[in-house]
Image (cartoon, rainbow, N blue to C red):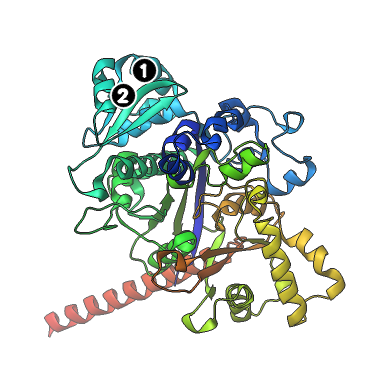
Amino acid sequence: MQEAVIKGSSYILAHTPNTLKVGGTTQTQARNKDSESEYLKNLDNYLRDFSEAVRYAPNQCYIGNILPDELKEISRPWYAEDNLLEEKRFGKRGEIMPEDEFYGLVQFVDVFDLVKLEEEFVKEIEPKLNDHPLLGKLDLELKGTPKEKIEELHNGSRTEPLYLGDRLVGVVKGAHESDENLSAHVIMENLMSKASGVLALLNLGERDGINLEDIEYVIECSEEACGDMNQRGGGNFAKAIAEKAGCVNATGSDTRGFCAGPAHSLINGAALVKAGVYEQVAVVAGGAVAKLGMNGKDNVKKETPVLEDTLGGFAVLITADDGVSPVLRTDALGKHTVGKGSSPQAVISALVTDGLDKAGLKMSDVDKYSVEMQNPEMTEPAGAGNVPEANYKMIAALGVKRGDLERKDLMKFVEEHGMPGFAPTQGHIPSGVPFIGPAAEMMAADKLNRAMIIGKGSLFLARMTNQFDGVSFLMEKNTGQGSKEETADKEEIKSMIAQAMRGMAESLIEDDKE
C-alpha cells in the first residue's frame, strides 16, 4: 500500500480588532451584562494596530518567516516595541491580512447577498484587493451599498455591524426571520470562518505550487457549525470553501472534534490517500470569531495588549508518496480511547506512548513534539500558564517513568524536544498542526527526522460527555525508499499483466489454428 505524504501547508492570519469588539464572546457577554462597563470603555486602549500585529514575532513564526526555536532568541514580552520584528505581511507559508481587505473577502465568499458594504468603502478597498497577489487573480465583483441604506440596516434588527474604528463600513444580515442558527451573528461567524479558510487554501496553492483544480477531496475541521434549525451543524464548510477557492474537481465534508478536529482530519485524509480513494486530499480550517479577545478582561486588568486579535487559518495537502515530502505514518497512531480515563496523565500517555510502542520507538527518538501550541503571552495573563511548556513537562515526566530518559535530563528534554508556543488561541488552530510547516522545512534542510503531531480536544464543553479526546501521528523525513518500492511494485504488476495478456493471446491464436 502506498504511503501518504504531506505535500504542502499554509498558515494565514486576519487581523480583526473591530470584529473582536463586535463578535468575540467575552465582549458580547460583557455588553449584554453592562454596555457601559469599564472593560468595554478601556478596551480600545489595549488593541494593536495592523503594523504591531504583523511585527509580532509569534505571528511572523506562524506564517513561516522564522522557525519556532528562533523565538527563544527574542526577549519577552514579544509585544514590547523593542522586540518587534521587521514588518513582513507575507511569509513563506502564508500571510497576515488587514481587516479592511478581509471585509472585502468576506463579501466575496458570501453567495446569498448577506454582506452589505458601504459604496465608498468598496471603492477604497477594491484597488488593494486587485493588487493582492492571490485575490487579484479572482473576479471579486464587490457590491457597494449607499451609506444611508447601511445605516438603515444597522438601525433595524437582525444585522451585525462591520466597523473600522468608529466608522460603520458595512453590515451582515440575518438569513431568516426567526431561525437563531441563521441569525446575523451566526452568519457573520460562519462567513468569516469560510473566508479565512478560503484564504488559507489559496495560499496553499500559491506557496507550494499546487494546482487547486487537482484536489479531489476537502476536509474542513474548524470549530464552527453551519446549518439551520432542522440540522444544526449539518455543514458543509468544505464544499463551500472549495467552491470559492477554485477546487472545481473536489467534493468534501466537515469533521468536528473540538481542538482535536485537525489531527483527526489529517489521519482521515491520509487513510483516503493510502487506500487509493483519492489522490489529493486537502485539510483546511478557518478561524473562530467567538474566541477573539477571549482573555481580554485579564489583559485590560493587567494592562497588557489584547493579543487575541487575529483569526487563524491553515490548509494542508496530503498526497501519495512522491519520494520527497514528509511521510504521515498511519502505522504509529496514538489515540485516547473511551476506557483510558480523562486525567491529564492518562491523556498524554495514550497520545504519546501508544504510537511510539507500535513503532518500536523511544520518546527520545522523536525530535520535536507539537502539542497545544498556544502563545503563552495570550494564556499567562488569564492564569492558564504556559500551555506548551506544561505539556512538554508531562511528556518528559512520562519518559522518566518509562525509563526512556533520566530524571536529571527532564528539563533538557523539554528544551530540546519542545518549542515555544506561537499560535493564536483559536482552539483548533494551535492544536498540533502549526508545526507541520516548520517541520517539513526542517526535514528538507536535514535538521529534523521525526516529529509527533498531537491534537487534544475538550469534549466535555458540549455537555454530552465528561471525556477528553485526542489523536496523534508521526511525521517523518522521506527517505525516498517507499516511493521507489511502490514504483517497482507497479512495474512488476504491469509486467505480470502484460505476460498474462500475451499468454492469453497466444492461447487464442493456437485455438484458432486448431
Q: Residue at x 60, y 53 (%)?
A: 435
Quadrant for the N terminus, please.
bottom left
In this orientation, which residue lies closer to the viewer: 158 or 503? Answer: 158
Q: Residue at x 55, y 29 (%)?
A: 44
**Residue 22 spot, x, y in % from top left:** 42, 35
The answer to whether residue 287 is visible is no
Quadrant for the C terminus, please.
bottom left
Q: Residue at x 61, y 32 (%)?
A: 46
Estimate how packed mark 2 is, as few (under 14), some (14 to 19) or many (20 or more) residues with alpha carbons within 10 Å.
many
- 464 above or below 129? below
**Residue 503 spot, x, y in % from top left:** 28, 79
The secondary element bearing badge 2 is classed as strand
Q: Which mark is residue 50?
A: none
In this orientation, which residue lies closer to the viewer: 501 or 477? Answer: 477
- Left or right: where does residue 190 sit relative to residue 363? left
Would you identify the image quadrant in which residue 155 lies? top left
- Left or right: where does residue 170 sit relative to residue 308? left
Q: Which residue is mark 1?
A: 121
The answer to whether residue 385 is visible is yes
* Mark-to-mark CA distance, 1 and 2: 7 Å
Q: Which residue is mark 2?
A: 117
**Residue 136 spot, x, y in % from top left:** 39, 25
The three-letter code of the residue at mark 1 reads Phe
- 224 above or below 201? below
Pointers 1 and 2 in contact (C-beta within 8 Å): yes
Q: Residue at x 51, y 34 (%)?
A: 40
The three-letter code of the residue at mark 2 reads Leu
How many numbered tags mark residues here? 2
**Residue 66 spot, x, y in % from top left:** 67, 41
